[in-house]
Amino acid sequence: MTRSQPRGARGTVGHAYSALNMRLALAIFGLVTMTIFAVLAFRAGVAGLGVLCAVLAVVALVDLFVIQRRRAARHREEPGKRHSLFE
């Protein structure tokens, strides 16, 4: 089961916590930009760059899935609580 960050806990060097909402925004940005760059690279005939951008878009998509699972776990543990983008 995926757990969210414990209440009041701060990340440390050994056990870091991430800002899930900020990660979500960055993953969406990465997915959109890498998909656009992949399409443009394939149209320009630069297959190597297109494949690299497509792989990075898939990584962003997987990250979106992980982030959503962690956000869902946080909402199960703290129902009704709203979190800011940087929290």
Image (spheres, grey):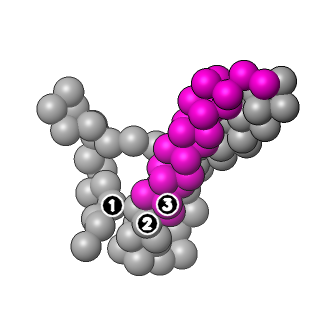
Q: Do labels 2 and 3 touch, CB within 8 Å?
A: yes
Relative side of 83 to 38, left or right: left
Indicate the quadrant where residue 37 lies. Answer: top right
**Would you say residue 29 is visible in this rendering?**
no
Badge 3 element: helix
User: As shown in the figure, which amino acid type bears the numbered disc 2?
Assistant: Arg
Indicate the quadrant where residue 40 lies. Answer: top right
Q: Residue at x 32, y 42 (%)?
A: 17
Indicate the quadrant where residue 70 lies. Answer: bottom left
**Nearest to the observer: residue 55 or residue 14:** 55
Relative side of 23 to 54, left or right: left
Residue matched to label 3: 65
**Nearest to the observer: residue 79 or residue 46:** 46
- Where is residue 72 shown, x and y percent of the image? 46, 70
The chief SS type of the magenta part is helix
Q: Which mark is residue 69?
A: 2
Relative side of 50 to 3, left or right: right
Above-or-below relation of 80 to 2 = below
